[in-house]
Amino acid sequence: MESRFRINAPTVTHQVIDGEVIILNLDNGFYYSLADSAAVIWQSLNGAPVGEVVAVVERFYDAAPNEIETKTSEFLAQLAEENLIAAVDAWPFEITAPEAPATKTTFTAPVFEKYTEMSDLLLVDPIHDVDDYGWPRTQEESQGSPAQS
Amino acid sequence: MVFENVSAFWQQNQTKNSSSLKLVFGGHTTDVHFATPRLRETFSPALEHLASDFAIPDSEIFFCEATGALQQYHLFDDINLLGPHGAIPNLPNNCFGSVQPVSGVLSLYDAQNRRGYVVVRDVEQLPNFELAAPLRLMLGWMGSTSSFSLAHAAAVANSEGAALLVGRGGSGKSTTSLACFLNGLDFLGDDYVALTHEPEPTVWSLYRSAKVAQPSLRLHPELSDFVKRGPTSENDDKYLLDIDSLAKTVEDVGNIVASSPLRAIILPRITNEAQTLIRPTSAMAALRALAPSTVFQQSGGGAITLEKLTGLIRKVPAYELLLGTDGKAPEGIASVLSKS
């Protein structure tokens, strides 16, 4: 059975604007920017067999034999490592893909830009310390020192 | 059970001196009920410019404080773990809740019944960010389930329309918005505003407040006369300004306005160059500057907020504002608005 992936919603959310993709991981505060072939792969992968994703990319770009297949597979592995996508056995929902342009362009390997500077906004240390009346202690109260942001 | 507990808590907290304020923004009216005069005195300065006696509310927020015997009130039957942002687990569908980890303020919102609760433990110890932007989490949840979006952005305007200043903390949006205000542009907010998309993109003021860091006070020493409260801790290191007094006292400043049509999105970036420059930038750059800091501060409703912000950015041109030492940011923003 050919492998396929789904977008790791609802943890991961994304939007497409002017052919580029922004992805937000709502659990860890990381966000990503994808353009060119990376954006095409992202917009094609949800539920599709990997072979179909490769076929979509091949409709957009000219490349040496097997280059698109190799780079697409590598990129999907990177997205999985980031927990942005997850493997699935089957996909009962509609599979969509972006429409290819009339003329192909030269293929460049897909990459993502990853941004981590917002992760502290999620204040990922959960509160699990409460006082005698059941009020959660603030970070300062829990740590006995100025809270970490 | 936490909603039932907090509702009962509100009933205990009310006195004959409880009062209400109807706030109008973004096509919505929220009736904010303050259990005590102290709560109203503390939080209404940032909000009163939105007040209306005539609007019909479509939501309600109940503001309580836990003092004296009420400190012993058990709000949580079982609080083992709060998630990121102090998110309260196991709430009913369409409900949001969190305990802010630094301030300890509890916020709860029931989107189906459009009812929210805020419980403050110690009004005197609140950090400046709670006084400058009260109900921020609540408004984010309300926005994700209605027609407006809460945005982490500053905004200024003139007769042509509004410019939305976007970027993460430290990018210069607050200082730039104040500089514009001091130079005669109208002020809608320095840190959070509301956005609506229909019939045209519009910015709505939420807070009549501003916070500045020490370097900005050095750049604009005239602001020192309007410092209401200094930093309270390492996590609360900005000065809270009395922007209402500033507007009434200083000559040639702009007005604090309720709303303005959105004409441009501005990405300020501090440089060491002498000259301030402004140039077009991509929609993706604008979305990256606006969406992550807005969504990640929200604790719920992130996917809907991202979708709404993306839709808005598609409609409005974006510019990068390279801030030089010449202090010409207000002129740069005014020039962009005049072309819109």
Image (spheres, rainbow, N blue to C red):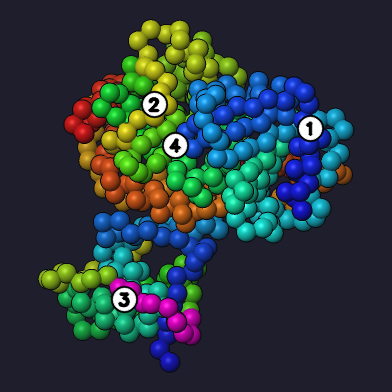
Residue at 35% over, 10% down: B252
For the residue carrying disc 3, how many other residues have a C-alpha within 10 Å: few (<14), some (14-19), or many (20+)?
some
Residue at 42% over, 16% down: B220
Question: Quick check: do tags 3 and 4 share a chain?
Answer: no
**Which region is colored magenta?**
A88-97
Q: Secondary structure at mark 3?
A: helix
Q: Secondary structure at mark 2?
A: helix
Are the residues at dot 3 and dot 4 in contact (C-beta closer than 8 Å)? no
Q: Nearer the viewer, mark 1 or mark 2?
A: 1
Question: Quick check: do tags 1 and 2 share a chain?
Answer: yes
Q: Is B4 rendered above or below residue A97?
A: above
Q: Nearer the viewer, mark 3 or mark 4?
A: 4
| B245 or A74, nearer to the observer | B245
Residue type at mark 1: give it: Asn
Residue holding disc 4: B26
Residue holding disc 2: B177
Q: Nearer the viewer, mark 2 or mark 4?
A: 4
CA–CA distance in space, label 4 to label 1: 30 Å
